[in-house]
Image (spheres, coloured by chain):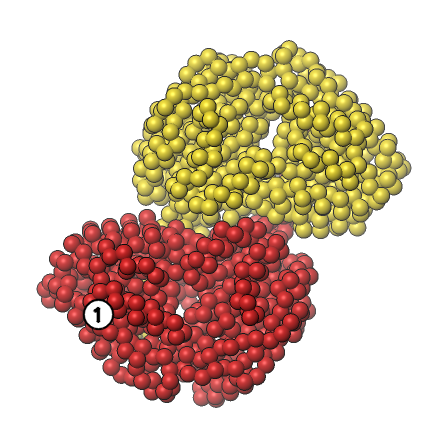
Chain colours: A red, B yellow
């Protein structure tokens, strides 16, 4: 059964391998839910509704109770209860499940994982609703980002894992010439996993940020225990349920993947992270928890994606309108709740050169504020673009940011066309002095964007570099028609390990990265210590263990 | 100049890439110095002699004094003095040298590194004498292991680094279909190094254990500072001097590689390891220093090769004489001073099945002791095989080991045919009870081998597994003609991450691993946290930083 899954999905998988190899655009997961047709959408919505006010079924070991208090940012409690399991029971079960999975070999494991991804795609609409009503993403964006693009990242992880495991032949014949005649040794190489992996997910990107680690672990033979954020359990509970079913169908122990839900203490992540049997940790979340894991979970390899302060330097442009449109799109998308959203825009007091003349820094601020208004004029479109604030506590950040400078455009609670109690907010634009220490005294997250002036563009780049080095960054946006500035920007990007997005004026935004082509996070600045999906991200999850013996006959 | 080096060495480098790809026997570095001819040997010896009683010249920055007190294990002081440099000065110079090296790109860097390896090969004889008179290796073994095989490990690291950097195209064109027409982005990917690397070398394997890290660092763009063991400076000083010259010739700053010699405090390694600018550490040495680095040098990625307790399980054989010969060869080679030397032999009280009948555990011990005597009967051969104890303090370990059980064959000070005051010792064989806690109360190193009996072979494997899990292991030797035992042994090997050497009866020994084919160390047991040279060993040394911009036209 299980080997046939690899064969069955091989044409698809070959395309994924080629896409990763050539870093081109490709996806087997269409991003537009409308293309699914009304029936699929209705069915998926009904499937989501069926989870509400009910107990989520998972046949996991070590159940000690039930928990779950998710509340939709659109204004109602989900009222789903999940089994709370003892971490030791999940670890024990995972370890028990591991060896048959290891011995099945890379092809079988990847065949099963491909089947999981495709089955999750079939559950895409309910997954999107689950993401929408936990993270606050709009439904179309949830389908695009938390389903299609998350599946892409999972598939990319499978392709990268396979490539790494296949770099070494599983058998080799080694012949050394010697005086007394050649000596031949038979060598066998087996990829052996590091051990049980713990994936600690976040509240705004529960699937997209977790799927790389989950599928890299499974592909390389490591069982995985998923600790969802208490505010966004359902998308990962669905993932685990689907994966467990397919593992069972394929003849494997479903405890290769399990869900570790928080109990009342809220300390489950830290307790599990220090268990000696946990050998891999994938973490997405705030800076302090990430640092704590790295400094304390010595027994594990820790892959951490943390907070960041992404900068945009505006020097000059050939397309001023395009610049404004792209920038507003970028800072409005899911209301700044993606890791790579722009947080600080820097503009020189010398102004911004455009084909229509120089725009002063002051005018630029005003134009940007106006452009936000224009983009969000249409209520339906605003709701789709902004989604909702995933948690009430983000309002504190808004309040705090307002007091840090001159408000160029205030955040406003907008009326959602369908959900009257949704936490739908337009972005806040505040002009600050970057030398003011208060600006960075808390992590900037959500619908907040700061604007600051510098003496020159060179100073803007220097300021951006210092901020990215100190607070971390996942993306650097630069608008410049000047080759010299472009070159300086490229140098900053290389020095700080931040991908450079140059002159984005169309539909491509710095917040979203494309699987198979774009690396997300680098490890050279505080925002992350790993990258989706480079070689180090997968190759650290397994070892090649070898046997040699004299060749027979 | 520099790009031409890559082109010039490309035929050689292609062969190295193919060898790594296919894990076959291959080397461009012949291991037998006799093949060089008398003239080369005489010249090389003279070159070595010229370093004695002199100041070693290195034009490094930040010189604060001179130091160096190496004493040959063959019985005379080298009396070489090296410049002692301030670590901060070396770090500053390394950082200053880095960016032109990064921008030169992978081909140029690897071309220069290939030239360094080949130039070191040309200095092979003096390198071998330098290794001999610091580590105590015999001259032929020093030439084989510390020159030829060390160069192989360096070349392997270059091949693996190149493969990893080339996994991603440096440019890609990415086109996404959209309603309003396709959008094309140009993407550029640049491998960017992690930062300055520190290589902390050991006294018994100064080159072989360090060359993988040194050349992986340089190939991926990281400058490297080498901290040699105070007892084995000369082989690495030579390496650094040759490398600096070639870097200069190729138009680069020689401070891409420098030598950090201990001052009187002996704390230089720890001080340098905690500098915030040190982003990579390659360490070979004892367990406690390795652990300390991993737990304290949070700012760096630490690759550590530590101590180990390698086991051999003797169950049955088709070639009893071959078994004895190989085992004695293995435990005599460089007097047990290689990391993967056998430390503990386990045999069942049920005896050892051979084609000539069952050999009792007791008889096996006696036969092994006798075989040691036979192999070392010829003084010239004994000296060549055993080399010398690299330090006087190893005698304490011998004394300690004698008291742990029944001495089956005592270590003896042998008369060296050419060096009357050489520390030439035959191996000690002691029968112990593995349940005796004293057996493992200190690291077993040097010409010591323990022999222990178990009730069955299954128990022997279980004991070996427990010891390897607790104390670490780099090699597991098993002799068995029984497929069931072979299978059990393979499972132990996979579970503990220890390469399995099955039924070695010829010239291949478990102590030596072959570059391009064999992985050395794995990271799944305490002996090491990395492997020469798997993908993780090189891919963690750089990041792929990307720039994207809308395609022009």
Query: Along the horizontal axis of the image, is A302 left or right of A474?
Result: right
* Residue at mark 1: A407
In percent of width and height, residue A52 lies at 53, 84
Name the image quarter holding residue B179. bottom left
Identified at 23% across, 55% down, the residue is A435
- From this viewpoint, which residue is outermost toward the left? A357
Query: B382 above or below B336?
Result: above
Query: Along the horizontal axis of the image, is B462 left or right of A392?
Result: right
Q: Nearer the viewer, residue B292 or B247?
A: B292
Identified at 18% across, 67% down, the residue is A365
Query: B5 above or below A546?
Result: above
Chain letter belonging to callout 1: A
Query: Along the horizontal axis of the image, is B489 left or right of B306?
Result: right
Query: A504 above or below B18?
Result: below
Q: Is residue A346 in sight in this rendering?
A: yes
Identified at 10% across, 64% down, the residue is A357
Report the label total. Answer: 1
Query: B180 above or below B473?
Result: below
In percent of width and height, residue A411 lies at 27, 75
Query: Along the horizontal axis of the image, is B463 left or right of B217?
Result: right
Q: Secondary structure at mark 1?
A: strand
Identified at 28% across, 78% down, the residue is A412
| Image quadrant where one finds the C terminus of chain A | top right
In percent of width and height, residue A517 lies at 40, 61
| Image quadrant where one finds the N terminus of chain A | bottom right
């Amino acid at each position: 059964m299980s080997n046939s899954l690899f064969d069955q999905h091989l044409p698809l998988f070959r395309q994924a391998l080629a896409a990763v190899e050539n870093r081109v655009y490709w996806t087997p997961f269409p991003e537009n839910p409308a293309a699914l047709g009304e029936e699929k959408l209705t069915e998926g919505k009904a499937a989501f509704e069926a989870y509400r006010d009910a107990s989520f079924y998972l046949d996991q070991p070590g159940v000690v109770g039930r928990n779950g208090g998710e509340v939709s940012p659109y204004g109602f409690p989900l009222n789903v209860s999940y089994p709370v399991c003892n971490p030791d029971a999940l670890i024990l079960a995972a370890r028990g499940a591991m060896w048959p999975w290891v011995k099945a070999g890379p092809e079988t494991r990847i065949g099963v994982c491909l089947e999981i991804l495709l089955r999750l795609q079939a559950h895409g609409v309910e997954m999107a609703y689950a993401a929408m009503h936990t993270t606050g993403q709009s439904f179309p964006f949830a389908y695009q980002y938390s389903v299609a693009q998350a599946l892409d990242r999972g598939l990319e992880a499978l392709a990268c894992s396979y490539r790494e495991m296949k770099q070494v032949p599983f058998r080799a014949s080694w012949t050394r010439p010697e005086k007394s005649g050649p000596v031949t040794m038979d060598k066998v190489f087996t990829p052996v996993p590091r051990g049980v992996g713990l994936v600690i997910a976040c509240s705004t990107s529960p699937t997209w940020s977790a799927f790389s680690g989950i599928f890299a672990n499974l592909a390389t033979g490591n069982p995985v225990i998923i600790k969802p954020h208490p505010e966004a359990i359902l998308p990962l509970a669905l993932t685990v349920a689907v994966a467990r079913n397919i593992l069972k169908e394929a003849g494997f122990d479903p405890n290769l993947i399990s869900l570790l839900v928080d109990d009342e203490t809220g300390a489950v992540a830290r307790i599990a992270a220090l268990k000696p049997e946990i050998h891999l940790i994938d973490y997405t979340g705030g800076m302090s928890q990430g640092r704590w894991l790295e400094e304390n979970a010595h027994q594990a390899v820790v892959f951490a994606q943390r907070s960041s302060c992404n900068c945009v330097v505006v020097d000059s442009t050939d397309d001023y309108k395009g610049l404004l449109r792209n920038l507003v799109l970028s800072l409005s998308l899911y209301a700044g709740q993606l890791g790579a959203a722009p947080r600080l825009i820097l503009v020189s007091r010398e102004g911004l050169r455009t084909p229509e003349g120089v725009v002063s820094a002051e005018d630029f601020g005003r134009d940007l504020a106006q452009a936000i208004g224009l983009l969000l004029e249409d209520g339906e479109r605003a709701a789709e673009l902004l989604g909702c604030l995933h948690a009430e506590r983000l309002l504190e950040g808004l309040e705090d940011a307002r007091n840090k400078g001159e408000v160029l455009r205030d955040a406003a609670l907008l009326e959602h066309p369908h959900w009257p109690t949704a936490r739908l907010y337009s972005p806040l634009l505040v002009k600050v002095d970057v030398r003011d220490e208060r600006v960075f005294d808390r992590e900037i997250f959500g619908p907040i964007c700061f604007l600051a002036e510098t003496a020159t563009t060179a100073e803007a780049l220097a300021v951006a570099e210092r901020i990215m080095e100190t607070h971390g960054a996942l993306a650097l946006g630069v608008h410049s028609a000047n080759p010299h500035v472009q070159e300086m920007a490229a140098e900053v990007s290389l020095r700080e390990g931040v991908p450079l997005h140059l002159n984005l004026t169309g539909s491509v935004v710095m917040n979203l990265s494309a699987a198979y082509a774009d690396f997300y996070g680098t490890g050279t600045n505080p925002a992350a210590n790993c990258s989706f999906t480079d070689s180090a991200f997968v190759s650290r999850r397994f070892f090649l263990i070898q046997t040699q013996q004299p060749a027979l006959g």
